[in-house]
Image (cartoon, rainbow, N blue to C red):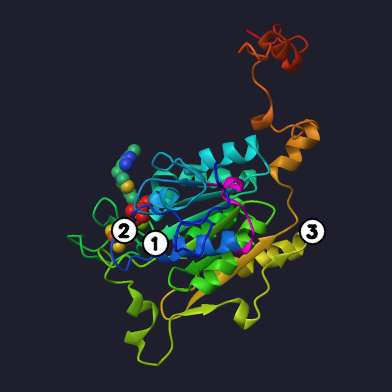
């Protein structure tokens, strides 16, 4: 990437892109984008040290709007791209972004499997309760009985809770932020990036065009008439999410139950912050380097693939010989 320390004119972030952002006025996506810019600056990363992968949806456009490496991938497929990039070049800071529809319906299988792999990446779900890009159909996070602007009838389906799904899938860092609380969101994004393992950060993201139920005023609790907002920070109330490296199973289960219980809260009080951080589980890269000690020296993305004449350096026959498995009497068990 050329000119990696050059800021866009008149802008304070190294990661700011001059591209026109075609999100609607007031969209929560702007708050998430700004938080990403600010956090990457604060962590003193450079644009060529970061790769951002987007799903399909309004949210999926984020990689275009950040000056980093990035790919606008396929609907529901952002996590396989991000996983591949991290395994190919472990030194890269890898962030996957996408909508609640992208990640929790068509991409739900990938979400579950990314959790169990515990790959060192950050997945940010923009949770607006609708399919914004395709004109406001209900997304999996919309609750049973709710009816947003573009729906002809209330939802007949129960919602999916991304936090409890992520917990059971095996994500080792799970958090929730709010798109208009940039200060807290920056803090959460930084923690998610620094976490050694798979981090899922779901961000409550008002979509003022299609979701009139969960707008800025609703989150601010204006309808409650008690002068308090709906959102509160778990950490402000002394909630400790950390499972230490040497925690035993009992403590780990205790923290999982605590996380599940907090994830269930919704309505008049909605928790934000870190729900769990489990430091006791090895990452996929730890397993890989244990089996293949030379895996990161150099990493797959940094290995030469051809000689100076363009001839491939890989010898597939040698590779197959090295990886072949001999099963004694394999033929005798066949009927
Ligand atoms: C395979 C496939 N199916 C359907 C679509 C149509 N489509 C585009 S975006 C989208 C949903 C977007 O919703 P969400 O992920 O919540 O993102 P948002 O727009 O709300 O940010 C759908 C169904 C598609 N692009 N590809
Ligand atoms: S449709 Fe909703 S989510 Fe999409 S850009 Fe507009 S306000 Fe944002
Ligand atoms: Mg959405």
User: Which residue, given by chain and number where applicable, does mark 2 sit on?
Assistant: 23
| Residue 301, horizontal then vertical, whole percent | 64, 31
Q: Residue at x 53, y 60 (%)?
A: 201
| Residue 265, horizontal then vertical, whole percent | 49, 73
> Are the residues at dot 2 and dot 1 in contact (C-beta closer than 8 Å)?
yes
Q: From what the image shows, is residue 264 above or below residue 156?
A: below
50 sits left or right of 245 in the view: left
Point out the image quarter for the N terminus. Answer: top right
User: Which residue, given by chain and number where applicable, does mark 3 sit on?
Assistant: 245
Q: From what the image shows, is residue 217 above or below residue 122?
A: below
| Residue 258, horizontal then vertical, whole percent | 63, 70
29 sits left or right of 244 in the view: left
Q: Of tags 3 and 1, which is closer to the observer?
A: 1
Mark 1 Cα-neighbour bin, 10 Å: few <14, some 14–19, many ≥20 = many
Q: CA distance from mark 3 to mark 1?
A: 35 Å
- 233 or 263: which is nearer to us? 233
Q: CA distance from mark 2 to mark 1?
A: 7 Å
User: Which residue, given by chain and number where applicable, does mark 1 sit on?
Assistant: 29
Q: Is mark 1 within 8 Å of ligand 2?
A: yes
């Amino acid at each position: 990437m050329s000119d990696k320390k050059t800021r866009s004119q008149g802008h304070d972030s190294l990661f700011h892109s001059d591209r026109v952002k075609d999100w609607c006025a007031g969209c929560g996506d702007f708050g998430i984008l700004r938080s990403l810019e600010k956090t990457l600056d604060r962590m003193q990363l450079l644009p060529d040290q970061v790769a951002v992968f987007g799903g399909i949806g309004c949210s999926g456009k984020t990689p275009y709007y950040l000056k980093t490496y990035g790919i606008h991938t396929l609907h529901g497929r952002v996590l396989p791209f991000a996983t591949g990039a991290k395994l190919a070049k472990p030194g890269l800071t890898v962030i996957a972004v996408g909508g609640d529809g992208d990640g929790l319906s068509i991409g739900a299988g990938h979400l579950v499997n990314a959790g169990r792999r515990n790959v060192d990446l950050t997945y940010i779900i923009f949770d607006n309760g609708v399919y914004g890009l395709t004109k406001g159909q209900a997304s999996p996070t919309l609750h049973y009985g709710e009816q947003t602007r573009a729906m002809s009838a209330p939802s007949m389906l129960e919602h999916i809770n991304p936090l409890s799904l992520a917990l059971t899938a095996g994500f080792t860092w799970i958090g929730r932020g709010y798109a208009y609380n940039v200060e807290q969101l920056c803090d959460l994004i930084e923690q998610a990036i620094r976490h050694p393992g798979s981090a899922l950060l779901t961000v409550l993201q008002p979509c003022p065009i299609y979701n009139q139920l969960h707008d800025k005023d609703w989150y601010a609790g204006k309808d409650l008439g008690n002068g308090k907002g709906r959102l509160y920070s778990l950490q402000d109330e002394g909630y400790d999410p950390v499972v230490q490296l040497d925690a035993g199973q009992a403590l780990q289960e205790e923290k999982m139950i605590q996380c599940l219980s907090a994830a269930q809260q919704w309505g008049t009080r909605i928790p934000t912050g870190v729900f769990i951080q489990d430091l006791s589980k090895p990452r996929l890269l730890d397993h890989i380097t244990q089996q293949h000690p030379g895996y990161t020296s150099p990493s797959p993305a940094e290995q030469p693939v051809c000689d100076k004449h363009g001839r491939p350096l890989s010898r597939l026959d040698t590779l197959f010989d090295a990886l072949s498995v001999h099963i004694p009497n394999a033929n005798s068990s066949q009927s």
